[in-house]
Image (cartoon, coloured by chain):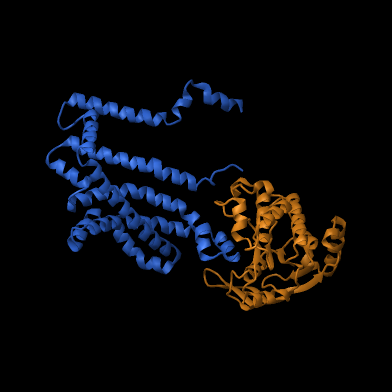
Amino acid sequence: MNEIQRAGVTSRFEIRIEDKTHVGADGTLVPAIRDFVLEVAQESMTVLMGPSGCGKTTLLRIVAGLDDRFVGEVDVPAGARIGVMFQEPRLLPWRTVQQNIELVAAPDFGPADLEWLAQAVGIADMLPRYPQELSLGIARRVALARAFATKPDLLLLDEPFVSVDERTADRLRRLLLEVWSARPTTAILVTHNAREAILLADQLVLLAPRPTHVVAVETIAVPQAERDGKAIDAIHADLLRRYPANFTST
Amino acid sequence: MSVTFARSDAIPGARLFRGPLVSVLSVVGFLLVWFIAAEIAQSRLLPGPVAVIHYIYEESVHGDLLTELGITLWRVVASFVVAMLIGSAIGLAMGQMPALNRALDPWLIVLLNLPALVIIILAYVWFGLSEATAIGAVALNKIPNVIVTLREGARALDPGLDEMARAYRLSPLSKFRNVTLPQLQPYFAAASRSGISLIWKIVLVVELLGRSNGVGFELYLNFQLFNVTAILGYTLAFVAVMLAIEYLLVQPIERNSTRWRNKPV
């Protein structure tokens, strides 16, 4: 049965959300997503970029299977392994770094995998520590390692680099790219940061304000490794010219 | 840096007052006051510490004191386990299900305010003077406190960690062990702490009213004989047992389960 489900994973994911409406505490209806359709390519980095509050997190929660009150279909197979990086690290404070990673790890995740992953994100010395002993930047690295420890069929990243300073955020983005290139994974990242989106995306999906839907899908051809400051500026200038509404505020 | 250093060593011997020495001095002081009071009173109704400790020794070696202590301790442990199990289950359920909480809340308030004596008397009248009735009556007195504490614990569970557990598809058992239980640990600790002290006091009342052994029964017997030495002896012996449980069992367990806390960044 598992084999059949995994067979589904090898094709493209399709996300189709016709309607997602939040019900407020006082019963008011707040439409969050309307007629959203997206195909996610295998082993590529899909970045969803939209203004703050446009429903990006809601979208990702639906894809992660955390919210099933919506009209539509997400064909993530039931047996697919998912790795998630939330806006906060969300580590278990009463478990060590190593225990946090191993708790969610794939069944075939062994000591060699742990060592490689810890080296790759630079937390090899931190494995026996408790999360409260870590800075936010280091805790983010642990959360990144944990997401990859599941050997995910689908990696979901919800603004994973907010609320750390720009230099730390930049180092974390490079780390993500390194680990992700070494272990190609289907990934969906949401952000409101244009430069982050341009640095990371294979497929850049521009979202409309609430109720959100897809405005355009841009494929960025330059390999991520070659996107230095100048290349990002050039891509940004081009996108700003074509989608002024999506790129002026950031 | 140097200021802090100077302050901690400014008063000679200040360091001595920080460790267990203060606790020891405090106990010695209490014994001294007791000793002097007994010497002044020179009454059968206020025996000194030497007489009481001698009584404890004699009764342990030649009498039934250890047996009676054991029986009472067993009732305390049994009531405690029953109260914690039932109280935690109900408390957690009420904390997570608002409808259930609304349905059971009036009962909880009634039970919280029902005097221990009423519960004990009615239990003995309705279910007979048996061991099970005694333990059940004591547990019933403690259950509402456990419910209230654990209900708060269930309400304070972190929804972010819950989402994490669901997103990573943790099994229900793994989620309970790794995510839920550690969050409830302080609430369990609080409920057990107040639980043990409350329970052993109520156990004595239950023994006094309807059992023919245990510390409570002995206290009642010696009250009728006006044997204050025996009353103080039994009390002191059982307090010693409870202190031993606190320092040798409860506190080490608590230190061990909270060692992840309060570590500097």
Q: Is residue A159 visible?
A: yes
**Which shade of the palette goes to chain A?**
orange
| Relative side of A116 to B194, left or right | right
* Nearest the eye: B86 or A3: A3
Q: Is residue B14 left or right of residue A169?
A: left
Q: Quadrant of residue B3?
A: top right
Question: Which residue is farthest front?
Answer: B62
User: Is the residue B256 above or below the residue A192 in the image?
Assistant: above
Residue A64, above or below A173: below
Nearer to me, B142 or B168: B168
Measured as percent of width and height from the top left, residue A70 is found at 60, 76
Q: Residue at x 31, y 49 (%)?
A: B198
Q: How many marks?
A: 0
Q: Quadrant of residue A76?
A: bottom right
Does A75 sit left or right of B4 as displayed? right
Q: Quadrant of the C terminus of chain B?
A: top right
Quadrant of the drawing holding the N terminus of chain B: top right
A219 or B58: nearer the viewer: B58
Instruction: In the displayed orientation, state which residue is furthest to the top.
Output: B12
Q: Quick check: can you spot residue A250?
A: no
Q: Which chain is blue?
A: B
Where residue B26 appears, as percent x and y from the top left, is: 35, 30
B112 versus A13 height, above or below: above
Q: List x then y, in percent, for residue B101.
A: 39, 65
To which quarter of the image does residue A16 belong?
Answer: bottom right
Q: Residue at x 29, y 47 (%)?
A: B73
